[in-house]
Image (cartoon, rainbow, N blue to C red):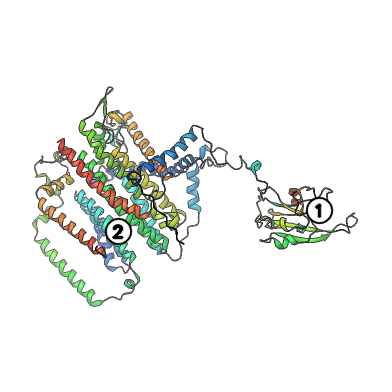
Amino acid sequence: MAIVVKRPKLSILEKMYLPGIIKGLWITLSHAINRLRGKSKKVTMQYPEEKWDDQLPEYYRGAPALVTDEQGRERCVSCQLCEFICPPRAIKIIPGEIEKGDTWEKVEKQPATFDIDMIRCIYCGMCEEVCPEQAIYLRKDYVITGESREEMVHDKDKLYEIGGVRVGLVNKWNELK
Amino acid sequence: MTELLTILYSLIEPTIKIVVLVFMVILPMVAYSVYAERRFSALLQDRVGPNRVGIPFTKISLAGLGQPMADGLKFILKEDLTPGHVRKFYYWLAPALTMVPALLTCAVLPFGGHLKLPFFDEPFQMVIADLDVGILFVFAIASLGVYGIVLAGWASNSKYPFIGGVRSSSQMISYEISLGLSVIPILMIYGDLNLGSIVQQQHEKGWALLPVTLDGFMPVFSFRDIVLLVPLLISFVIFVTSLFAETNRLPFDLPECETELVAGYHTEYSSMKFALFFLGEYAAMIIGSGFAVTLFLGGWSLPFGWGGNGEESLFWGLVAIGTFFAKVIGFILFFIWVRWSIPRFRYDQLMRLGWVFFFEIALFNILLTAGILMFFG
Amino acid sequence: MEVLFYIFSAIMIVSGLGVVASRNPVTSAMCLVGSFLGLAALFIQLDAFFIGIIQILVYAGAVMVLFLFIIMLLDLKAEEKKSVNYMAFAGGLILALIFMVQLSAVLSNFEAGDVGFTPRQAQLTLDKDLAGLPESANEKLREDKLPDVHLVGRMIFTKYNFPLQVVGVLLLVSTVGVIILSKRKLS
Ligand code: SF4
Ligand code: SF4
């Protein structure tokens, strides 16, 4: 059903635009004057000097990273689910065995290499969602820079460096995240 | 041979004036008014604006004063793309055609009274060409500016630029009329088309919009001038508003309004050719401000008839030049202030404003001025 | 300063030829603008500043913009592809030649043509103080300069006042006519 919007009837003064224009001019000018007198604050953050870090929300999605558990073991079992789900195909995993002689040798696998191409990654968080082992998380790092394409590929060491240790249950749906 | 020499000799003075005024004052001013626009608009909107670029390879930022240079370099280094579907000759001609008329008009702009330099007997007049038909010259040359925009729109051979070109030509022709009519009361009052002598008269009798001189501390004014303020104020409002429309500035920037036309007539332009449109617009704004100041706000003269016109001493000559540019900069800031405060008009509103209101009011205003002048004899 | 005369005449003639010869209507229109600019420069050389400037203001600045406007809205392709009609071409050439012969015949019998470019002399035989001119204009007359705007204005409003009014009425009539024609329905 069509909605009929009734146009407001303007008084002569309003039709002349002039009072409205002067009002608008005054609003912008008062902002400028307040800025000059130091009364109002600028809203811009000047990036490298001022940062947003302490205001990042809990759900912020930064660089994806791998984590170890409280015993220092790699959580990732190289199931490659994240590799499949990743929309831009940023993850490349070569699955491998746990070293011979390790106590947990017979329990699981672990990735031989685990690369995330940060030029491709779109920070969607699908990998975190899909991981059955809670091994990959999106952290709050956002300053990912490099001078070559190679530098922008995070290998396993780098991913563990960003990720660090994550304690807690291997339970996908609990609150601890 | 001697004839040729005298001709060449007579060309020296104008050439120096042209080089100094256009290349050393107006063009840097164009570059810096872009910077001023960005800083001032940031101030109006609680932002910061460009404040980083200073001296290259150092950490000295000078509040971003190097920004125009960096912008210029960027424009030159960008890829200069000529799309395959354009009409090449006019596509290349159009940017020049917007820039040239904008700069040509400053030939008759009196940017100071006189300058009495040491070692010269005669004081120099601070205007490139002291034309007797100065104001008409301005209107004539400014009306050529529309060719650049129309040709750009047509030569781009695509739809948005074309609509932009069509819009701008009708807009500029419409507002030229109210612009011209709003100046007529000034011409009637001063009885002269020579901008230099209009300013000289304002210098002696007080500005058009401030017709008061001080005798000691006693204000001196004539009743006639006070009554004449009514038509002059109406003229001023119409003139300034039409100036916004003529220079395609917001709130009347419909030829290039982004929300409807991508970028209007310069959609297909890139790199330095785009920069020429961009800078042409700013040059037109600066020179438009120059004329508003010259006609209504006393040009280079100080208020209340203070100071001199520089015929006697070098000092007052320099003060006059300084006053002129101070006023022009103030007016440019006003332009920027309006741009960042008032939303864009609709196209039919624009046309209605020009033809139905300003045209009639300006005509009536001329009649009013004539009546007042007749009444006071 | 004769150099300038030849330069601007050359500009006028070349762009005049461009108007006729070019196949693209926009080029023709732009050439016409160039020709108007050259003409204005010639007027200004003859000290007729007012006429020169008005030439630019009215023809180059307003009329030709409207022309260009219309040309752009029309389809150009048809015009560009049209073949040359040789009969019309020859006819036009002959007419132009006849006109040139006639013009040169008239000019060769025109004595005032020998005087050369001295518009000032003719003008300064006028009275030095003309009634109805503002003081600044009279001053210029005394200095042997030509306040041509004032003189033109004075002429129009004294000697040719009636024709001026008639022209004004004529323009008004045509404006009203255009408005009536452009309104489809009269209510
Ligand atoms: S965040 Fe998204 S894009 Fe990045 S690695 Fe994980 S799944 Fe791939
Ligand atoms: S989904 Fe988890 S466990 Fe499987 S490969 Fe990826 S990070 Fe390792």
Circle 1 residues within 10 Å: few <14, some 14–19, many ≥20: some
Q: Residue B68's spot in the image, x, y percent?
A: 47, 44
Residue sitting at x 80%, y 49%: A168
Q: Is mark 1 within 8 Å of ligand 2?
A: no
Residue sitting at x 65%, y 46%: A57
Specify whether disc 2 shares its chain with disc 1: no
Judging by the rendered image, the residue that carries numbered circle 2 is: C65
Circle 2 residues within 10 Å: few <14, some 14–19, many ≥20: many
Residue A150 visible within the image: yes
Q: Residue B174's spot in the image, x, y percent?
A: 30, 53
Chain letter of mark 2 equals: C
Judging by the rendered image, the residue that carries numbered circle 1 is: A74
Q: Amino acid at mark 2?
A: Val
Q: Quadrant of ligand 2?
A: bottom right
Q: Residue C87's spot in the image, x, y percent?
A: 22, 77
Label 1 SS:
loop
Q: Residue A24's spot in the image, x, y percent?
A: 41, 42
Chain letter of mark 1 equals: A
Q: Nearer the viewer, residue C107 or C154?
A: C154
- Give the alpha-carbon distance from disc 2 to disc 1, as whole Å: 76 Å
